[in-house]
Amino acid sequence: MALKKDETSFLFKPDIDAKADEFGVKLSKSEKKELLNEIGDYLVTEILSYVGDANSPVSGYGEFKKLSKEYADREKLGDRSPILELNGDMLEALTFEIVDGSLKVGIFDEDQAIKSYNHNKGDTVPMRRFIPDQKEKLKKDITSYVDTIIEDYLSDKGQD
C-alpha cells in the first residue's frame, strides 16, 4: 500500500500458514479470520498507544516533533504534546480490513485520510509518521508480538 490523500494504509502479512505448519495445526477459514481479527485489533491498539506517547510506531522513526508554541497556544491551551488529536476524529478512524489473508491497516475515511496523509508525509504539517509507507515496517517489538499472538492461538488449537 501507499500513503495517498484518499486513504492512508499499509498491508501487513502475518505468516499464519507457516506457523500453523510448524505447530502441526490446520486452521479453518473462520479460525484464520478470528486470528486475523485479533492481530488487527492488536495492531490498531499499538499504533494508537505509540501515537498517544508522541512516538512513531514505524521502524526508523522516533519521537514526534513537539507542536509549535503558537499552534499549541491557539489550539491546545498551550499543550505542545504532538499526539495527533485535535478533535480525535482522525485517530478514531484508524481501523483494519482483512484482504486475502492479510491485514490492511489504516484510515479509509476520505475526510480523515487527508489529515493522516499530511501527518505521515509532512505535507502541510511536520512529519509524524504513524502509518508505514511501502518500504517501511512497524517497529520490531510490535511485529514480534504478532508472532506471539499467532503462537498462543495455535498452541491453544493444538490442545483441542
Image: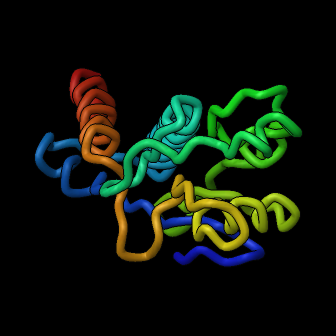
Q: Residue at x 64, y 67 (%)?
A: 8
For residue 34, say whether it is visible: no
Give residue 89's position: percent from left, percent from top.
84, 43
Residue 121 lies in what quarter of the image?
bottom right
Q: Nearer the viewer, residue 103 or 83?
A: 83
Residue 2, compared with residue 72, is above or below; it is below
Question: Which quadrant would the C terminus be assigned to in this image?
Answer: top left
For residue 67, say whether it is visible: yes
Task: Using residue 67 as the reference point, say whether residue 103 is left or right of it.
Answer: left
Q: Nearer the viewer, residue 24 or 107?
A: 107
Q: Residue at x 72, y 43 (%)?
A: 91
Q: Residue at x 55, y 77 (%)?
A: 2
Q: Residue at x 49, y 36 (%)?
A: 50
Task: Using residue 57 as the reference point, say whether residue 67 is left or right of it.
Answer: right
Q: Nearer the viewer, residue 68 or 93?
A: 68
Residue 37 lies in what quarter of the image?
top right
Residue 23 lies in what quarter of the image?
top left
Give residue 81's position: percent from left, percent from top.
63, 32
Residue 68, compared with residue 152, is above or below; it is below
Residue 6, compared with residue 51, is above or below; it is below
Task: Using residue 94 as the reference point, say whether residue 15 is left or right of it.
Answer: left
Q: Nearer the viewer, residue 103 or 123?
A: 123
Give residue 22's position: percent from left, percent from top.
11, 47
Give residue 99's position: percent from left, percent from top.
56, 66
